[in-house]
Amino acid sequence: MSEEIKVVTENRQARHNYFVEERLEAGLILTGTEIKSIRAGRVNLKDSYAEIAGGELWVVQMHISPYDKGNRFNHNPLRRRKLLLHKAQIRKLVAKVQQQGMTLVPLRLYIVRGLAKVEIGLCRGKKTYDKRAVIANRDAEREIARAFRARR
């Protein structure tokens, strides 16, 4: 039985700025107008990050646009949203973030079986020279692919 995953948005800037060491799937606690905006694709993960406060995991700065038909029941677009993980998973994340100097970044938001999920990445920041090396490798691979296509 294959589950259909509808990817709503991806944080492509995170792959540019961080090395992703580990990925976790977390649920989100949302209001009614937030899930309607997510289903409409009106979400931005660009500057968002996750933090651990009081033994709970929160996503901060994730922008979910107000729902068009939400009237007075609309939500604050930048409010902190609680992520749902098991306590043991949160404890492991706390240890890694504190000891190894890593950060938690939302990588993508998707819908599975009608539920919104966030893929959280345990990430290590890239230095400027790392970013340049990645860009150089990508350009070299493009040149090789072009040469192969021209040769055929």
Image (tube, grey):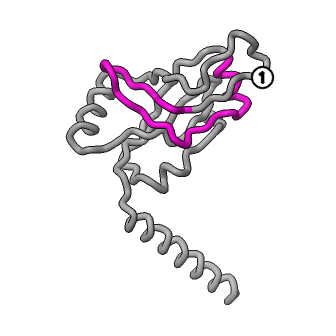
Q: Residue at x 37, y 42 (%)?
A: 122
Residue 106 in the image, given as x and y percentages of width and height: 48, 38
Describe residue 124's horizontal placement relative to residue 44 as left or right: left
Residue 76 in the image, given as x and y percentages of width and height: 60, 20
Q: Residue at x 60, y 34 (%)?
A: 110
Residue 137 within the magenta-colored segment of the rendering = no
Location of mark 1 (residue): 68
142, above or below 104, in the image: below
Residue placed most toward the observer, 3 or 44: 44
- Could you tell me the amino acid type at mark 1? Asp
Image quadrant occupied by the N terminus: top right
Q: Residue furthest top?
A: 72
**Residue segment shown in magenta:** 33-62
Describe residue 31's horizontal placement relative to residue 124 as left or right: right
Describe residue 25's horizontal placement relative to residue 12 as left or right: left
Rendered image quadrant of residue 35: top right
Q: Residue furthest bottom?
A: 151
Q: Residue at x 53, y 51 (%)?
A: 13
Q: Secondary structure at mark 1?
A: loop
Image quadrant occupied by the C terminus: bottom right
Rendered image quadrant of residue 17: bottom left
50, above or below 35, in the image: below
